Image (cartoon, helix red, strand yellow):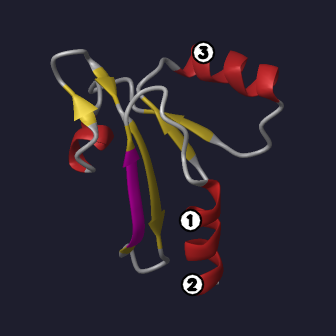
Amino acid sequence: MLGVSVDHVFALKAWATQENYQFPLLSDFWPHGATATAYGVFNTDRGMAVRGTFLVDKAGIVRFAEVNAPGEARDQEAWKKALASVA
C-alpha cells in the first residue's frame, strides 16, 4: 500500500509520524499534481487533489477506484473487499 499526496515530502513525513503510518507516502509535489492529474483527481482551480482510492494490480490494471470530495469519508469496506478479491 502506498499513499500519494500533492503535499511536499517534508509535510508528508510530519503527517506520517503524527499518524504513525507504517506505509510509504509519496509526494506528487512536482510537477505539481502530475500523478493526480493522470488519475483524474486533480482540481486545477484549487491546486489540490480530491480524495481518490485506487487499487492497481501487479500488471498495472486499475481494479478498484473511488473518488471522494474533500472531507468526505472513504468507504473502508469497499476498498478492503476489492483488495481481498485480487489477493
Q: Are marks 3 and 2 in contact (CB under 8 Å)?
A: no
Relative horizontal placement of residue 4, taking residue 68 as reference (left or right): right
Q: Which residues are magenta?
A: 63-67
Magenta span includes 44: no
Q: Can you give x and y, in whole percent of width and height, for residue 14 in the image?
A: 71, 16
The circle on residue 10 is: 3
What's the magenta bit mostly, secondary-structure-wise? Answer: strand
For residue 85, above or below residue 73:
below
Label of residue 86 in the image? 2
Q: Which mark is residue 8?
A: none
Amino acid type of the residue tagged 1 in the rendering: Ala
Q: Residue furthest left?
A: 45
Question: Camera-side residue: 10 or 69?
Answer: 69
Residue at 80%, 43% in the rendered image: 22
Disc 2 is placed on an element classified as: helix
Q: Return the x and y of residue 2 as percentages of the image width and height.
A: 59, 50
The quadrant in which the N terminus is found is bottom right
Which one is nearer the viewer's eye here, 17 or 73? 73
Residue 68 lies left or right of residue 36; in this view the side is right
Residue at position x 26%, y 17% in the image: 47
Foreground mark, 3 or 1? 1
Q: Residue at x 23, y 48 (%)?
A: 38
Residue that carries the numbered disc 1 in the rendered image: 78
For marks 3 and 2, the one nearer the N-term is 3
Residue type, numbered disc 2: Val
What is the CA distance from the residue labelled 1 to the residue labelled 2? Answer: 13 Å
Q: Residue at x 61, y 23 (%)?
A: 12
Say which label, 3 or 1, has the lower sequence index. 3
Q: Quadrant of residue 28?
A: top left
**Residue 51 at x, y = what percent?**
43, 38
* Amino acid type, callout 3: Phe
Depth check: give the residue in front, 28 or 47. 47
